[in-house]
Image (cartoon, helix red, strand yellow):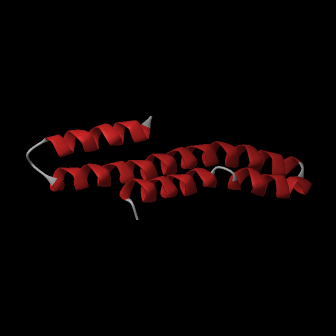
């Protein structure tokens, strides 16, 4: 859905008489949203997971491997957001 919004914004930018400046700006906003929103959601997820894992490790220290994996999983969202921003900008 996000790519559809960006595509619609690009189409609107091309149909105006302003030219390429608006199109470049909208592409930059789309790329910034792709990274920014994924980073915010990752931070929120890691805050909840981190609190739960701190309690788990206080009771069961042998679960440290699971805790590290559970904290690493949300990081993939930021990596995917970075990939999407590269796809949007065409780099």
Q: Position of residue 48 (x, y in %)?
A: 64, 42
Residue 55 is drawn in which quadrant?
A: top right
The number of callouts visible is 0
Q: Is residue 7 above or below residue 20?
A: above
In this view, the residue in front, 47 or 31, is 31
Question: Which quarter of the figure is the C terminus placed in?
Answer: bottom left
Q: Residue furthest left?
A: 17
Using residue 74 as the reference point, say whether residue 67 is left or right of it: right
Q: What is the x, y in percent for residue 67?
A: 78, 53
At horizontal 58% and vertical 50% (from top left) the residue drawn is: 77
Q: Residue furthest bottom?
A: 91
User: What is the x, y in percent for residue 28?
Assistant: 31, 55
Q: Quadrant of the N terminus?
A: top left
**In the foreground, 18 or 35:** 18
Residue 29 in percent (x, y) is at 31, 50
Q: Is 66 in front, or is 34?
A: 34
Residue pictured at 90% horizontal, 50% vertical: 60
In this rendering, position of residue 6 left or right of residue 69 = left
**Going 76% across and 48% down the picture, which residue do you hit?**
53
| Residue drawn at the location 25% of the way across and 41% of the way down | 11
Question: Who is closer to the viewer here, 36 or 11?
Answer: 11
């Amino acid at each position: 859905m996000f790519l559809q919004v960006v595509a619609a914004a690009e189409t609107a930018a091309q149909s105006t008489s302003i030219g390429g400046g608006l199109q470049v700006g909208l592409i930059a906003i789309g790329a910034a949203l792709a990274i920014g929103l994924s980073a915010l959601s990752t931070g929120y997820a890691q805050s909840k997971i981190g609190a739960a894992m701190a309690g788990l490790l206080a009771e069961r220290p042998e679960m440290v491997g699971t805790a590290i994996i559970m904290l690493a999983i949300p990081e993939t969202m930021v990596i995917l957001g970075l990939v999407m921003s590269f796809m949007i900008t065409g780099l």
